[in-house]
Amino acid sequence: MSNPVGCVILAAGASRRLGHPKQLLVHRGQPLVVSAVECALQSQASACAIVIGAHASRVRAALATAPIEVLENERFDEGVAASIRVAVAWAKARACQALLLALCDQPKLTSQHLDRLIAAYEHRHMLTASRYSGKNAVPALFPQAYFDDLAALRGDRGASALLNGSAPVSPVPWPDGELDVDDAEAERRLRANRFDLTVR
């Protein structure tokens, strides 16, 4: 049986620029990785998974009660491309017609936004991306026709070139996407704006 849209949370990074696991930063009472997984599970995606790598045992423990498939990326040191390849292999195995990729370090992620992306894809059946900071970015939804392009990615570069290249993209505005916890400066900026983040 095919799955129209599979959603995968990418959470394998080592958080070197941050200095501690971003996956386990606590916001509003729970780790960011748990919040991201809940968003995926509450969305209209027909199948959900998460890719882990660095800090795998601690992330698994945080997700112990979450009914989500956990995929391990043993090559997480390569960068995000390795996690994307794991996600694509999962989507192919599940016969997904499209793959929705999201991150665990965007604290304002909601299931409603993921559903807006899914609805836009179902309307146009084309690349669909969140639009913020003047560009197309993740969370983003990739039709099956782009799976091989995603699988060809290497290194610490995600799908930005694909989302902002020559291929037509259906943009879904999401100003909240500008808020992430990518590095120590971003974390300080969020705290300065009274954004509650604590280190677990």
Image (cartoon, rainbow, N blue to C red):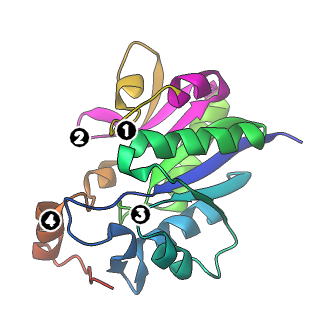
Q: Disc number at residue 133?
A: 2
Based on the displayed image, in which of its 4 quarters is residue 199 positioned? Answer: bottom left
Task: Please say if the residues under marks 1 and 2 sit with CB atoms less than 8 Å apart.
Answer: yes
Which residue matches tag 3?
54
Amino acid type at mark 4: Ala
Residue 107 in view: yes
Q: What secondary structure is marked by label 1?
A: strand
Which residue matches tag 4?
184
Q: Residue at x 35, y 66 (%)?
A: 107
Which residue matches tag 1?
137
Q: Which residues are magenta?
A: 124-151
Eyeballing the image, is 34 above or below 104?
below
State how far apart marks 4 and 3 are (Cα): 18 Å
Q: What secondary structure is marked by label 2?
A: loop
Q: Is residue 185 left or right of residue 13?
A: left
Dot 3 or dot 1: first in sequence order is: 3
Other-residue count near label 1 (Cα within 10 Å), few / some / many at <14 / 14–19 / ≥20: many
State how far apart marks 1 and 4 are (Cα): 21 Å
Q: Nearer the viewer, residue 78 or 81?
A: 78
Image position, residue 47 (x, y; %): 72, 53
